[in-house]
Amino acid sequence: MSRPSHLTLSLVALTTCLFMALAMAPVKATEAAPSELSPSQDETPILTLHSDGERRPVSRAEIESSPLHEVTLQHFEGPQGSFAGVWLDDFLDSQNLDASATLRLIAHDDYTVFITPQDREETRYLLATRLDGDPLTLTEFGPTMLIIPADAQAVEAGTASMTHWIWSIRDIQAQ
């Protein structure tokens, strides 16, 4: 039996290195998939919903009463991993909010984002409540954050706007 040539060995080594690099590369997000996580049972209010002149506290358990979805991504502000939450439109439906309302999301640092009905028709927003299965906390950009899985790569590359991404959401106002 003949010995493999140096060229053959080099090609095998190169192929192995490329395979390892691809296997270790971070997963790029394009869409969230249904999650196997169990919904939270935590009834502690984590944000306030404002609608029709009323204010009401909303818990993680209430948010996660809609089907959970997960996406693995690198957030442009640093957090990386599997973000889990509910689609914003599903959350709005579960709270009986008018689909034609413009939303004003306000963070704990008073940063504000407006999401119009047209924005929600064009883009799917994930209201994330967890990172790698654990509840998001204020020190981890929580307790909720709004992410756009389909735009994650473009935002990270600087080719798409990050203005609708908001974290540490304190209030959601339906206007």
Image: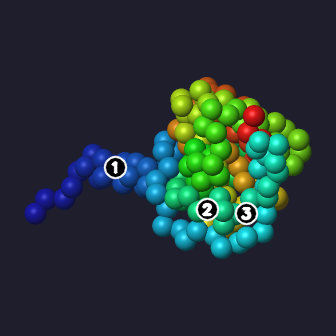
| Percent position of residue 148, x then y | 60, 40
Q: Which residue in the structure is indicated by mark 1?
A: 15
Image-based side of 175 in relation to 132, left or right = right
- Residue 68 — which label? none
126 shown above or below 111: below
Question: Could you tell whether 26 is left or right of 74 in the image?
Answer: left
Towards the viewer: 105 or 82: 105
Asked if residue 156 shows in the view, the reply is no
> Callout 1, which amino acid?
Thr
Relative side of 11 to 45, left or right: left
Query: Which residue, given by chain and number where applicable, does mark 3 sit on?
Result: 59
Distance (Cα) linking label 1 and label 3: 50 Å
Is residue 12 in view?
yes
Residue 172 appears left or right of 32: right
Residue that appears at 38% across and 52% down: 19
Viewer-closest of 138 and 52: 52
Image marks 1 and 3: residues in contact by CB distance under 8 Å: no
Image quadrant occupied by the C terminus: top right
Query: Rounded to the nearest whole Å, what is the CA distance between mark 1 and mark 2?
Result: 44 Å
Residue 24: x and y in percent read 49, 55
Q: Position of residue 160 (x, y in %)?
A: 62, 27
Kind of residue indicated by mark 2? Glu
Question: What residue is pinned by disc 2?
Answer: 64
Q: Nearer the viewer, residue 159 or 19?
A: 159
Residue at image coords 60%, 53%: 94
- How many marks do you count on the picture? 3
- Give the number of the mark in front: 1 or 3: 3
